[in-house]
Amino acid sequence: IDEFNNHCEWHGVVCNEVDKVIKLMLGNGGLSGRISDAISHLTSIETLDLHDNDLKGSIPSGIGKLANLSFFIVSYNVITGTIPDGFGNLSNLQLLHLHGNRLRGTVPLLASKGQHYSSFISDCGSPSVFDSPLDCPSCTMCCNSQNECDMAEKKTDFGMWSSVFIGSAVFALLILAAPLVKEIFTSNQNVPATSNAASNEHYTIGKDSVYSFFLSTSVTAWIFAIAVLATQTLCFGFFIDEASLDFGDDRMWQYSFSCPPNNLNCRDNSDVTAFGWIFFALFGFFYLTS
C-alpha cells in the first residue's frame, strides 16, 4: 500500500530528502504513448532517462524550463517533431541523447560543452531518414539511419593537423640539412657537373625535379624551390581539409563508432590503433631518411 501512496517508492523514481523527484530512470521499460506536458512540473529533476522504449509524439517544450536537468536520454524511441528552443537555456545539461528517433530541424546551441564524445548525440549523420539530417552544432557524436556513429569534431581537425604535421616534417628536414646547405654555399671548390658526386645527387633527387635546385649555390634557385615546396604543402593541407568529415550523402566516410541502446557510452569500432600510428610514423621516418 505504501508503494502506491508514496511516489518515491515507485519503480525508477528517485527523490531527494524533501520527496522531490530528482531522477526518472525508466529506460528499456516497455513504455509506450507520449511524454506528458506535465513533466515540466518536476522542477527538481536532474535525470530523465526514457531510452529504448516505444514513445511517440514530440518532446514537450516544458522540458526546456527544467533548470536542474543534467541528463536527458530519449534515444531509441519513435519521437518526432523538432527540439524545443528552451534546450539552449539548460546550463546544467551534461548528457543529451536524442539518436534513434525521427527528429527534424536544428538542435539549439547548447549552453554547456560536452565533456566526452558520448555527451551530446543526435541523428546528425548521413544517410538520414529525411532529405537532410538533423542539424546539431553542439553535438559531440552524430549517428545515421543505419545506427552508425562518428565524432562530430572530426569535421574540422584534419586540415589543421595535416598542416602542422607537414610543416613540422619540413622544418625538421631543413634543420637536418643545415650542415649540407652551409657546405654548398661556403665551398670554394667547383664540382664539375659531370662528376660522380653531382651525378649521384641528381639521380637520387631526379634531374627534372624542382628539388634539384636545392643542390645549387644560387639564392634565386633556392627561393624558387622553397616557394614550390610551400605551395605543395599548402595544397596538401587544402586537400586533406576537403576530405575531412562532412556528414553529407556525397561523402564516402566510414563511421567508426556505435552507440548501442544498452550503454550510455559509444563504442569505438575503428581498426586504427595507437600501435598502428607508431608503426606508420616509424616506416615514414625510415623511408624519408633512407
Image (cartoon, rainbow, N blue to C red):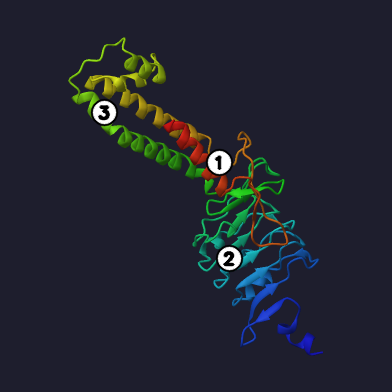
Camera-side residue: 41 or 99? 99
Q: Are marks 2 and 3 in contact (CB under 8 Å)?
A: no
Query: Disc 2 or 3, which lies upstream in sequence?
Result: 2
Q: Quadrant of the N terminus?
A: bottom right
User: Label 2's element?
Assistant: helix
Separation (CA) of disc 1 from disc 2? 31 Å
Question: In the figure, 64 relative to 5: above or below?
Answer: above
Separation (CA) of disc 2 from disc 3? 65 Å
The quadrant in which residue 24 appears is bottom right
Identify the residue at horizontal 70%, vertical 46% (top origin).
145
Query: Residue type at mark 2?
Result: Gly
Query: Disc 1 or 2, which lies upstream in sequence?
Result: 2
Question: In the figure, 47 relative to 252: above or below?
Answer: below
Separation (CA) of disc 1 from disc 3? 40 Å
Residue bearing the label numbered 3? 181
The quadrant in which residue 48 appears is bottom right
User: Label 1's element?
Assistant: loop
Query: Residue type at mark 3?
Result: Val
Residue bearing the label numbered 2? 64
Comparing labels 2 and 3, the label whose residue is closer to the camera: 3
Q: Quadrant of the C terminus?
A: top left
The quadrant in which residue 196 appears is top left
Camera-side residue: 109 or 75? 75
Query: Residue type at mark 1?
Result: Leu
